[in-house]
């Protein structure tokens, strides 16, 4: 398979092993701007490894990943870090907020790391917090807010830099159904309105139902279900 | 769903014409399947015959005469009894999906592929429901959630079966 025309992020024939364990065995992936793609599959199928490779967090053993026409493998570590800081956003299941910082400081953090002055960064952060309906929590610390609220703060932080790709790994895994659904609504609405692509790793069908299409990973191989039917 | 009981229940708040009953039913419970006028009138004549409703008045107009129906005491008791009787849960023991998977294994076809394609079809329905839920009111959300939970249960079964295909293959070969 070659990357579909117009794709923002694409992976071909990815292989990755951890010691004797094969995590990816020829996986493929592609996503367009503004698209939400669910990556599904049983535990241990290689979903998270695929996400980590796509985001340039771990290098694959072989295969190619292109972002906006550039090979990730051809970039220096510093370039990949810069990419993750400014073009990519991340939402994980747990423990992503810095406990010592207030919620608004947490959301502003990626902008501060990119050198934005504090006031400016916090103003932008607050705009996103309003959008995620958590602006009233700005002065609270993560330990003082509920799981659902904390996850919305984390989504605001993932979006604050205006990323072109948001990587979400089981973003509602620790939430009850109602909170999980609200987070998914807000995340996908916000991403679509900014034309960001969302790579959504989930094993929950109700969460995957917020995507535009899904790929299924099994035994390290991926299957694009839209092409399969 | 028992249309008769539902129409009776709608009459409890006050007498209505057949047309109003149809409209109330469609609005609250019809969703994608509105009642036919024929269904409403045949149901009302059955309820009349059993003494569960009575004709409260007839409006003569230019068109066909319009009957106004009212619920009787016997009708109220009937609705009460229906509401208090639990619905028998579906047993789901005659599953086409199960049959397809076993047949695929028996005939050495790719059962995993059948499960993958079915998952995609289920997810397609779930996307439509999720979208409708996002745009709908609370009633829409509740009815879509009901459907979504059932589809999700099917999907969980699909995943579990996919994980057990090797064992199932051995079992059906015996």
Image (cartoon, helix red, strand yellow):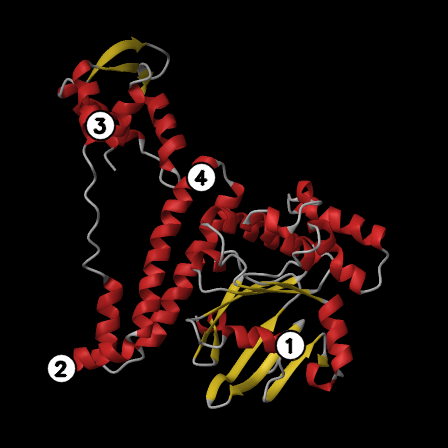
| Separation of residues labelled 4 and 3 (CA atoms) | 26 Å
Q: Nearer the viewer, residue B170 or B8?
A: B170
* Disc 2 to disc 3: CB gap under 8 Å: no
Choose mark 4 or mark 2, whichever is in front. 2
Q: Are marks 1 and 4 in contact (CB under 8 Å)?
A: no
Question: Label 3 belongs to which residue?
Answer: B43
Nearer the observer, disc 2 or disc 3?
2
Tell me, yes or no, if residue A4 can be seen here: no
Crowding near pointer 4: few (<14 within 10 Å), some, many (20+)?
Answer: some
The image quarter in which residue A84 lies: bottom right
Nearer the camera: disc 4 or disc 3: 4
Q: Secondary structure at mark 2?
A: loop
Q: CA distance from mark 2 to mark 3?
A: 53 Å
Residue B35 at x, y = what percent? Answer: 32, 34
Q: Quadrant of residue A191?
A: bottom right
Give the residue number, with chain letter if any, for mark 1. A57
- Mark 1 chain: A
Q: Which label sits on residue B140?
A: 4
Q: Dots 1 and 3: beta carbons under 8 Å?
A: no
- The earlier-in-sequence mark between 4 and 2 is 4
User: Do badges 2 and 1 share one subunit?
Assistant: no
The 10 Å Cα crowd at callout 2, few under 14, some 14 to 19, many 20 or more, is: few
Q: SS of the residue at dot 1?
A: loop
**Which is in the foreground here, disc 1 or disc 3?**
1
**Where's residue A27, x and y in %?**
52, 81
Residue at position x 46%, y 90% from top?
A: A20
User: Can you give x and y, in whole percent of width and height, for residue A61 in the image?
Assistant: 59, 89
Q: Position of residue A153 (x, y in %)?
A: 64, 52
Residue that protrudes farthest toward the right in the picture: A117
């Amino acid at each position: 398979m070659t990357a579909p025309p117009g794709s923002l992020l694409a992976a071909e024939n990815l292989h990755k092993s951890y010691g004797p364990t094969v995590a990816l065995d020829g996986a493929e992936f592609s996503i367009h701007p503004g698209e939400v793609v669910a990556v599904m599959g049983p535990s241990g199928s290689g979903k998270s490894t695929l996400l980590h490779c796509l985001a340039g967090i771990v290098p694959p053993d072989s295969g190619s990943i292109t972002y906006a026409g550039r090979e990730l493998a051809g970039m220096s570590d510093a370039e990949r870090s810069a990419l993750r800081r400014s073009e990519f956003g991340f939402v994980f299941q747990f423990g992503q907020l810095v406990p010592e910082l207030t919620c608004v400081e947490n959301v502003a953090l990626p902008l501060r790391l990119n050198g934005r002055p504090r006031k400016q960064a916090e103003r932008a952060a607050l705009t996103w917090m309003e959008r995620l309906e958590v602006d009233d929590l700005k002065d609270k610390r993560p330990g003082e807010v509920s799981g659902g609220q904390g996850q919305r703060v984390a989504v605001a932080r993932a979006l604050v830099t205006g990323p072109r790709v948001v990587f979400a790994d089981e973003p509602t895994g620790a939430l009850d159904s109602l909170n999980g659904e609200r987070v998914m609504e807000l995340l996908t609405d916000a991403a679509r309105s900014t034309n960001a692509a969302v790579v959504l790793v989930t094993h929950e069908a109700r969460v995957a139902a917020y995507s535009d299409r899904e790929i299924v990973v099994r035994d390290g191989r991926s299957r694009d279900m839209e092409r399969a039917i | 769903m028992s249309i008769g009981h539902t129409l009776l229940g709608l009459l409890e708040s006050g007498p209505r014409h057949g047309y109003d009953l149809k409209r109330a039913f469609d609005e609250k419970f019809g969703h994608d399947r509105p009642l036919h006028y024929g269904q409403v009138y045949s149901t009302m004549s059955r309820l009349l015959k059993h003494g569960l409703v009575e004709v409260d008045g007839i409006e003569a107009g230019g068109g066909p005469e319009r009957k106004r129906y009212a619920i009787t005491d016997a009708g109220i008791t009937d609705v009460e009894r229906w509401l208090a009787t639990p619905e028998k849960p579906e047993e789901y023991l005659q599953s086409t999906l199960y049959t397809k998977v076993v047949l695929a294994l028996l005939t050495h076809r790719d059962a995993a592929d059948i499960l993958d394609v079915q998952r995609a079809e289920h997810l397609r329905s779930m996307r439509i429901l999720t979208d409708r839920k996002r745009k709908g009111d609370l009633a829409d959300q509740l009815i879509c959630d009901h459907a979504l939970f059932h589809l999700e249960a099917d999907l969980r079964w699909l995943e579990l079966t996919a994980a057990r295909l090797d064992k199932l293959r051995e079992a059906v070969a015996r």
